[in-house]
Structures are given as structure tokens and as C-alpha cells.
Image (cartoon, rainbow, N blue to C red):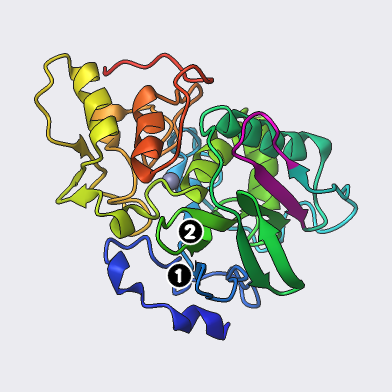
Amino acid sequence: MATTERFDFSAFDNGVGNSGFGFAHGPGVDLRPQLPETTPDLIGVDLTHRIDVADVAFAAAAGGASGKPGGGGGGGGGGISFSPYTTTASAYNITIEFKGGSWTQDLHDVFVSAADRLANLIVGDVQNVNVIMKGGLRLVDDILITAELKNIDGAGGILGQAGPTSVRTGSYLPATASMQFDIADAANFFAQGLFDEIVGHEMIHSVGFGTIWSYLGLVSGTNFIGAKATAEYNALLGDGSAAGVPLETGGGSGTAGSHWSEAIFAHELMTGYIDAAPDPLSRMTVASLQDLGYQVSYSGPIDGYALA
Ligand SMILES: [Zn+2]
């Protein structure tokens, strides 16, 4: 997709700027998202990052699915077609479009619930933007997320890929995002009660967590330095001394630099590894969305969270 080449990824040296296409995956499987055209209002970007089943620590610890069966796993047809869903919980509207032929009511509902939750945390309208993509011109108010279930490599291996596919000029807030999951892994994680955590985590990346930080100058060294999130971290510490929130340094590109530190924040939702449920969504994560420029609500569905 030539549009990928239009954008200078050099601002994304932290590794989240590209999606690991170089990693081995099944022949013929193209994980690249469709990128909108760059216009004066919008920059088409590929800020998606690949997610591996191994990033779900609970599954790995349980010995689940590290192999790579040759088959495509379940799915690939016979699923339900769903109309797009748009949140109405607040002035921040999230539209989810469901692509692929493997949707079940349960998997659909996970995305709807995650979007509803996020629309209760991000509550302020963001500037509408016209997006030119395959299929024509779309007016996006406020973010369009394409959710896709597809056969990637069967159970184990690649879980999927998610992140923004365009950002607004000026604010850099994402206008479109792509969330793709391997149907076999989605079904397995749903059965384990973890798919909601995974989708919630990836949807927060899709609105900018860890993906647009470089644009906004919010990372210094291995810390996230947004004032609101830093204040929440200091509240968790109780002593108010930290200059930033420690970020993950391990795990390679796509994990390091774009998540809270697993060593410090353990099971919080936005560390680089999904742990056994529950994975609480903290005030600190909501505050980090405020640091991106969103209007947020702290009376929304935030979980209780304390440092271990
Ligand atoms: Zn992540």
C-alpha cells in the first residue's frame, strides 16, 4: 500500500510507528490496515502494532497456545453481519465498523462494551474531520475504528494488530484506527474471559495511548511526562516526587515505550502484558488521555487501583 510511504515515520523511533510486517507470518496474510489519504486536515499513518498471544501473560503462564498450528483455526465464514455501532454516552463518539465474516454476538458485544466504556471516560467532542479512504469520503465524528476478525495464523502466535491509521493535523488525535484479531485467538481468549481486557487495552491504544505520545512530546527517556498522569502516579506513590510515569522498557518494539511499566504497575490494563483478569483501568490511564488533549471524566467507569 503505497500510502504507507507518504509519511515520515522518523518521529516514531520508539518502535511503535510500524507494525512488525517483517515478522514471519503465514504466506498470503496481509496485516496492513487501509490508511486514509493524507490531507490538510489529516495525516494517514500506520501506528498499529502487532500483538502476540505471548503478550497475554496469563495465557502464556497457563501454557496456552504457544504453538502454531498450520490450520487457520475457526472462523472464516458463517458469522453474523453487524451494522456499525456508534457510542452516544458522551459528546465523544466512537464508531465501530465490523469487518470479516467471523463475528459472533459475544465478540461483537465485547467491542460495543469497550467503546461504551471509553466514551464514558473521554467525554468531550473532538473536531470533525473528512477522511478520504477506499470507498470514498467519510466525515468522522470523532473516531472511526475498523474492527476485523480474520484468519491470521490460527491459535497462538499473532493475536492481532491495532492502533491509529490517521491522526488530525494540529492536535494529532486519531481519526481512524484499525483493530484486527485472529479469530482463533479471539475465540480462545473470549472463552478465558480475557477478550474484553484485550479489546479494552487495544481500543485505548487506538485513541492514542502509546501511539501518539511522540507527536505530543510526552515521553522523556523512559518516562511519560504528561502532567495529569504524573500527578496521578504521585498520588499512587503518596509522596508526590516523580517527574513522570515509568514506561515499559522490555518486550521489543510495540511494547517498550508505549505502555506503563509492567514491573511497577503489574496488572493495570495499560501495561505491556495482559494479566489474569481483572486488569484495572486506573485514574492514571484516564489522566494520560487528558494529557493527550481529550476532555475526560473521572466519574466514569474507572477501577480501583493501587500499587502493589
Ligand atoms: Zn498494548
Magenta-colored stretch includes residue 96: yes
Q: Where is residue 47 drawn, in percent x and y? A: 45, 62
What kind of element bears circle 1? loop
Q: How far apart are labels 1 and 2 at the CA level? A: 9 Å
305 is higher (above) or lower (below) than 71: above
Q: Where is residue 183 drawn, in percent x and y? A: 70, 51
Q: Residues within 10 Å of mark 1 (few under 14, many from 20)?
A: few
Q: Could you say which disc has been placed on residue 23 in the image?
A: 1
Q: Residues within 10 Å of mark 2 (few under 14, many from 20)?
A: many
Q: Is mark 1 within 8 Å of ligand 1?
A: no
Going by the numbered disc 2, the residue's amino acid type is: Arg
Q: Is mark 2 within 8 Å of ligand 1?
A: no
- Residue 300 vs residue 272: left or right? right
* Sequence-first disc among 1 and 2: 1
Q: Where is residue 78 drawn, in percent x and y? A: 90, 53
What residue does disc 2 label?
50
Q: Which of the pair 280/158 is nearer the observer?
A: 280
Going by the numbered disc 1, the residue's amino acid type is: Phe
Residue span colored magenta: 86-99
**Marks 2 and 1: in contact by CB < 8 Å?**
yes
Residue at left offset 48%, top offset 61%: 167
Q: Residue 129 sits in which quadrant?
A: bottom right
